[in-house]
Image: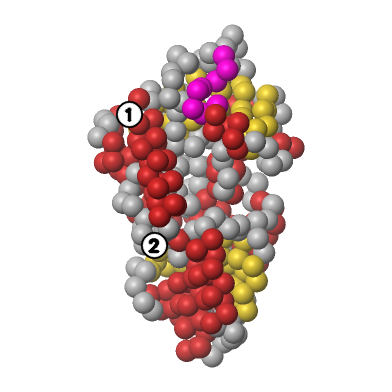
Amino acid sequence: MRRSARPVVVAAGTARGAGGALALRAVCVDLASRDAKSVVQIPRRLDAMTLPRGIRYIRLRRFSAVLRELIGPARRASTYVGMSDRLPLVRRSSREVLVAQNPHLYGKRLSGVSRPQQARLTLLATWARYSARRADLIIVATEAAKADVTGATGIAGDSVVVRPIPVLNIGDTKREHRGQLERIALVGDIYGYKRFAWAIDEIAQWALESGRPVCVDHAGGIGEQTASRSFQEAVKRHQHVKVVMLGRLPHSETIALLRSADVFVFPSSRESFGLPLAEALALGVPVVCSNIEPFLEVGGPAPSYFDGSRGSLAGSLDMVSPSHVRQDMAARGLKRQQPSNGWNVVDGAEYGK
């Protein structure tokens, strides 16, 4: 690729979640491999030392990042990539790419959230859908996410390219599986749609009925206060289940947590991809997850799926409890072909070409 006089600008200064940070890193790995100028706006708190060299990084506070997303890059760019489901309100580059990663901005409205949070989501959804309609190219990670975006905006499907997010830096796969199911991992910031409180209730039911002690390790920050309170109340209700809340961890420690788990439980009711799912499969960790379309697409036959009804997760845990079942699940997960290179969100070629 020839060096461009105008840079590729990637706007990711408002990315907050761990999944968004991992997706951003995959984008930077791809950009660093290109012979082109790149400018990437990153959250001020993000450790730039973990990102590849050869790129100019601009560290921004959240207010400054939002302002830049509103007005666009300070100077004209050859390509402007919006990594937060939105593009500037004023076009200033010759080509604008939207990376759509937040399914709740295109699907049905989330239930059980406060009025201020619902107002905020409505504003973001309006901006995201406006951005999608005026984007030159939209990148999504699954066919399910593509269907959400096209269904919500009415744009043509050929404007949306599906590229699975690559799994980076996971190290060695899981080597041993305990005879008994003792440790369960939950990963993700606490939001209502993650259904972590419900998952604790289900895990507690399984532990009580099976008579087995179990420890649940959760890695993730607080996304919504209401969901966090529900999670903590569920933990208090079930003293026979040991729950360790670790907060947000560095990626390497999250991977170590997944590798040490007997089962990774992913109870979300809505996702656009689910990086922890892809990482658990690549590590050879047995996965029990909800049967939403993105998870079915990413996981295929490897996980054990539940439908979210009462007792469904507890039933799945009972089914995967025998060690030979978990070993078979791990083997199926390792056979899943997960992308392992950078994430190209700049051009419109099909993924892998």
Compared to residue 261, the image places residue 190 above or below, namely above
Q: Earlier in the sequence, mark 1 or mark 2?
A: 2
Q: Position of residue 271 (x, y in %)?
A: 42, 52
Q: Position of residue 193 (x, y in %)?
A: 43, 59
Looking at the rendering, which quadrant does residue 56 occupy? top right
Closer to the camera in the image, 157 or 351: 157
Q: Residue furthest front?
A: 116
Q: Position of residue 34 (x, y in %)?
A: 60, 22
Q: Residue at x 45, y 42 (%)?
A: 101
* Segment tinted magenta in the rendering: 68-75
Q: Residue at x 49, y 37 (%)?
A: 84
Closer to the camera in the image, 276 or 45: 45
Q: Quick one: SS at disc 1? A: helix
Q: Position of residue 345 (x, y in %)?
A: 49, 30
- Residue 212 visible: yes
Closer to the camera in the image, 59 or 321: 59
Say which amino acid is labelled 1: Arg
Q: Which residue is under mark 2?
A: 112
Q: Is residue 38 left or right of residue 353?
A: right
For residue 133, which numbered disc appears in the image?
Answer: 1
Compared to residue 303, the image places residue 317 above or below, namely below
The answer for how far apart the CA atoms under marks 1 and 2 are is 29 Å
